[in-house]
Amino acid sequence: MNYKVPVIPGDGIGPEIIAEGKKVLEAAADKHSFSLDWIEYLLGAEHYLKTGELVSEETLKSLGKYKAIYLGAIGDPRVKPGVLEKGVLLSMRFYFDQYVNLRPVKLLEGIWTPLKDKGPKDIDFVVVRENTEDMYIGLGGRAKSGKSHADFEVIRTLYNIKFGLDVETDSAEIGYQIGEVSREGSSRVIKYAFDLAMKRRKQLASVDKANVLSDIYGFWREVFLDVARSYPEVKYDFNFVDAITMWFVKNPEWFDVVVAPNMFGDIITDLGAMIQGGLGLAPGANLNPEGTSMFEPIHGSAPKYRGMNKVNPIATIWAGAMLLEHLGQQEASRDVITAIERNLREGKIKTYDLGGKSTTSQVGDEISRLVRSS
Ligand code: IPM
Ligand code: MN
């Protein structure tokens, strides 16, 4: 069996961590008698600075022929903040309609957590982040004193929306942003979370801020309740986003599956990463179960560490394990995760963030060796 997998190393430390991810995945492929052909796409800052192009329709169409994309990181200080993140990363998430952003929060053996008296059996949940809507639709603007008008369009596979906005203000200038959740968009991701809860401990926590942003997140709750009717075995509750950050710290063992609208999901998964040992250990999957999915570490491009062979590649390797699982190579995926666990438990070859002195490539070599010898 041969799989063709597009790989986007991206910016900053992206190429270094992706090199280690590829190395480990190739070790798993050898062991399980399949092969991986990487198709490299050079998107990100260099490409943008050279050509002025973020990602072309043609590139998107070509990436769309595959089931899974392997992504390093996007973002560079030479480009205005947000240009690459929105123009490349979010463009791909939206274009491929990757409506589930799956982020496991699992403390592995041997890893230190800042939570006192909590261990691996207490920190083991999954955040299902909605990935195409909410405040992320990029719809907003600025208006100066007086009257103005703006037209906006949201184009999705599931639906389209047009907003026409007349603005009149006597403020010197305002900035505004419009968020939106749809019935179709929220119900599909909530269903995904219920299905996942059915395969785990049958508990689902929903995140919102329905007490204040009631039009958008009160609606999310209503859709959640509609979906919940089909899953009588799952115990669920509603959590305000501010409160859930407190419970993640105080009682992480309460959580099994957590489902959140896009922005709150973004915020709480950085907290999740910290309690599982840091951003160097947190993987993510952008899933379209029927289309093209994308696997990446949840951390950014860390430009200050670029080229130093210093950062932890484990988040990227773990994201690679999720990619293998998505391709249907469950055993190979399992082997990669077991090798990560062994490497961490043994605690000898580790990068600076875990208190070690090993390099990025030494960690990749060691995890590959463990995969091959398992
Ligand atoms: C993430 C990142 C992105 C997001 C940025 C880089 C656009 O923070 O994947 O969590 O906000 O989704
Ligand atoms: Mn984030």
Image: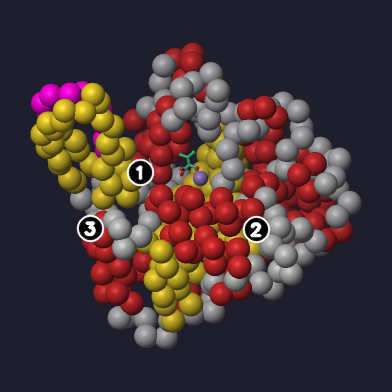
For disc 1, the neighbor class at 10 Å (few under 14, some 14 to 19, many from 20) is some
The dot on residue 215 is 3
**Amino acid at pointer 3:** Asp
244 shown above or below 162 = below
Q: Which mark is residue 275?
A: 2
Point 49% across, 13% down: residue: 50
Query: Seen in the image, is 337 located left or right of residue 57?
Result: right
Q: Which residue is mark 1?
A: 136
Q: Is residue 202 above or below residue 18?
A: below
First along the sequence among labels 2 and 3: 3
- Look at 70% across and 30% down and name the residue there: 305
- Contact between marks 1 and 3 (CB within 8 A): the answer is no
Question: In this orientation, which residue lies closer to the viewer: 170 or 343?
Answer: 170
State the SS at label 2. Answer: helix
**Image location (x, y in percent) of residue 263:** 41, 50
Name the image quarter holding residue 339.
Answer: bottom right
Q: From mark 1 to mark 3, how far is it between C-alphas?
A: 16 Å
- Residue 199, placed above or below residue 368: below
Q: How is the image coloured?
A: secondary structure
Q: Is residue 269 visible?
A: yes
- Kind of residue at badge 1: Tyr
**199 versus 223 height, above or below:** below
